[in-house]
Image (cartoon, rainbow, N blue to C red):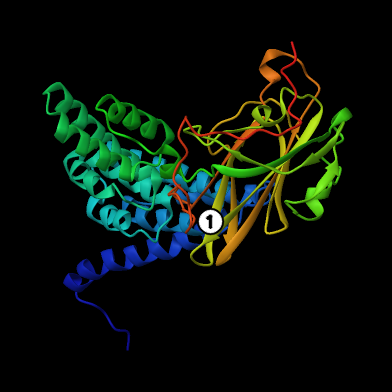
C-alpha cells in the first residue's frame, strides 16, 4: 500500500530536503575547481563547475570559503569569483548575507587567511557595525591581512591623541600598534611617529634582520659566469681560510651593519667593484626545530644556503629591491644554523647599478620575527663597521 504524508509535514520537510540537496550539489563543483593546476590543467572543468557554483545560495558561502583551505592560487581565484557573484546577488536581491556564520568562520584561525579576510570583507559590506567591533580583536591575528585593520585603527587613535597633545598616551598606543604591525609601510609610519616623540624603535629587532656577518671577496664574475661558478666558500666555510680572489688573496672578515633595515652593503667592505662575486655567512642559534621563512631583498644576482643546502637563487640584476622581496620557507634545526649568501655584481656602470647589497631576516609565515637565542644588541650608527683589508677605493 502506497504511503502518503500529511501536507503540513511536507511543508516542514521540503526546505530541509532542499538545503541538503544544495549542500550535496556544490561538493563536486568545489572538487572540480580545487583540482585546477598551475599550468591551467582542469580549467575547462573548473569553468563549468564555476557556472553552477555561482548559482548557489548565500547560505553556501561559508562552505565555499572553507574550500579555499585546500585550494591553490588559481583555484582560490575561481572560488573567490563565485563568492563575489553569490554575495552581490544576495545583497541586490535583499536576502542579505549570513553574517553570524561568516563571523564564526572568520574567528576560526584554522581557516585560510585569504578566506578569512574575504569573510571579514563580506561582514563589513553587510553589517559595518559588527565588523567595526571585530577589528580590535585582530591585532595579533595569525593573518597579516587582518592585522592591518586593527593596526590602522590604533594608528588613527594615536594620531588623534597627538592632536590633543596627549603625547604620553599616544606613545603607548603607537607602541601597541607596533607590537601587532607586520605591514612594512605601517611599521615605518609608526616608527616615524614614535621617533617624533623621542622614543627609540629597534626596527632590526622588530623585523628580525640579521646584522652580524662575516664576508669574503671579491671573486670573479666576468661575463656573469660567477653565479654558476663554485668558489671555495660554497664547498666549506672556514673563517680562517685564505683563497685566490679576483686579483689578490682574500679572506673572511667580520662585517656589522647598523642600517635600520638590515642592509648589508658589500661596497662598504670591498669598494665599488664590478664583475665581482662575494659571500656573506652568519650563524643563527634557534631555540627549537621549527618552520620559518628566510625573507631576502636584493637587486643583485644571489644564492642562499641553509646548513649547506641550497635553498634558492636568482640570476638577475638591477630589477629593483624591497623588504621581503623573496620569501623562502625553510626548516630551522634546534641549535646552530649556518647561513651563506652569494651575491654577484655585474658589468653595468650606470649610477643605478652600483648597489651591491642585500638584507635578510628570519621570521614565521606571518612576518613575525624569529630571534636568535644569542642575538646581540642591535648595532647603532656609531658602531665600528669593519672593512676588508683589500678594500678598493670607489671608482670615478
Residue topped by disc 1: 292
54 or 326, which lies in front? 326
Q: The C terminus appears in which quarter of the rendering?
A: top right
Question: Residue sitting at 43 percent across and 54 percent down?
Answer: 112
Q: Position of residue 336 (x, y in %)?
A: 59, 62
Question: Residue sitting at 42 percent across and 58 percent down?
Answer: 66
In the image: residue 91, left or right of residue 241: left
Which residue is the extreme one toward the top?
A: 396
Q: Position of residue 144 (x, y in %)?
A: 39, 45
Q: Position of residue 83 (x, y in %)?
A: 41, 45
108 or 263, which lies in front? 263
Q: Secondary structure at mark 1?
A: strand
How crowded pointer 1 is (Cα within 10 Å; few <14, some 14-19, many 20+) is rated as many
Residue 319 in view here:
yes
* Relative height, residue 35 to residue 315 (above, below): below
Residue 86 in view here:
no
In the image: residue 64, left or right of residue 165: right
Q: Position of residue 288 (x, y in %)?
A: 50, 67
Which residue is the extreme one toward the bottom?
A: 1
* Relative height, residue 96 to residue 373 (above, below): above
Question: Residue sitting at 72 percent across and 44 percent down?
Answer: 252
In the image: residue 84, left or right of residue 335: left
Amino acid at each position: 500500500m502506497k504511503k502518503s504524508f500529511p501536507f503540513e509535514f511536507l511543508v516542514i520537510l521540503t526546505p530541509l530536503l532542499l538545503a541538503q540537496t544544495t549542500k550535496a550539489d556544490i561538493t563536486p563543483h568545489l572538487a572540480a575547481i580545487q583540482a585546477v593546476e598551475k599550468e591551467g590543467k582542469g580549467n575547462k572543468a573548473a569553468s563549468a563547475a564555476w557556472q553552477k557554483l555561482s548559482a548557489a545560495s548565500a547560505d553556501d558561502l561559508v562552505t565555499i570559503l572553507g574550500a579555499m583551505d585546500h585550494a591553490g592560487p588559481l583555484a582560490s581565484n575561481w572560488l573567490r569569483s563565485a563568492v563575489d557573484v553569490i554575495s552581490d546577488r544576495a545583497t541586490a536581491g535583499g536576502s542579505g548575507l549570513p553574517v553570524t556564520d561568516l563571523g564564526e568562520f572568520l574567528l576560526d584561525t584554522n581557516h585560510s587567511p585569504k578566506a578569512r579576510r574575504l569573510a571579514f570583507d563580506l561582514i563589513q559590506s553587510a553589517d559595518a557595525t559588527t565588523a567595526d567591533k571585530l577589528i580590535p580583536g585582530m591585532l595579533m591575528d595569525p593573518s597579516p591581512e587582518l592585522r592591518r585593520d586593527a593596526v590602522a585603527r590604533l594608528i588613527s587613535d594615536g594620531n588623534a591623541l597627538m592632536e590633543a597633545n596627549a603625547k604620553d598616551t599616544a606613545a603607548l598606543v603607537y607602541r601597541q600598534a607596533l607590537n601587532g604591525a607586520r605591514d612594512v609601510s605601517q611599521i615605518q609610519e609608526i616608527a616615524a611617529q614614535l621617533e617624533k616623540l623621542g622614543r627609540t624603535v629597534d626596527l632590526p629587532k622588530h623585523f628580525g634582520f640579521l646584522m652580524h656577518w662575516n664576508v669574503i671577496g671579491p671573486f670573479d664574475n666576468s661575463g656573469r659566469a660567477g653565479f654558476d661558478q663554485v668558489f671555495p666558500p660554497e664547498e666549506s666555510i672556514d673563517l680562517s681560510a685564505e683563497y685566490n680572489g679576483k686579483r689578490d688573496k682574500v679572506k673572511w672578515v667580520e662585517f656589522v651593519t647598523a642600517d635600520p633595515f638590515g642592509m648589508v652593503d658589500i661596497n662598504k667592505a670591498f669598494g665599488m667593484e664590478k664583475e665581482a662575486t662575494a659571500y656573506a655567512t652568519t650563524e643563527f642559534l634557534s631555540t627549537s626545530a621549527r618552520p620559518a621563512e628566510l625573507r631576502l631583498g636584493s637587486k643583485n644576482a644571489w644564492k642562499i644556503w641553509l646548513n649547506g643546502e641550497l635553498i634558492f637563487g636568482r640570476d638577475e640584476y638591477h630589477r629593483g629591491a624591497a623588504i621581503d622581496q623573496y620569501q623562502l620557507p625553510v626548516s630551522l634545526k634546534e641549535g646552530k644554523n649556518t647561513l651563506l649568501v652569494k651575491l654577484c655584481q655585474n658589468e653595468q656602470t650606470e649610477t643605478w647599478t652600483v648597489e651591491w647589497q642585500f638584507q635578510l631576516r628570519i621570521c614565521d609565515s606571518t612576518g613575525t620575527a624569529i630571534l636568535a637565542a644569542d642575538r646581540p644588541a642591535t648595532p647603532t650608527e656609531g658602531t665600528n663597521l669593519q672593512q676588508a683589508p683589500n678594500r678598493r677605493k670607489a671608482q670615478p
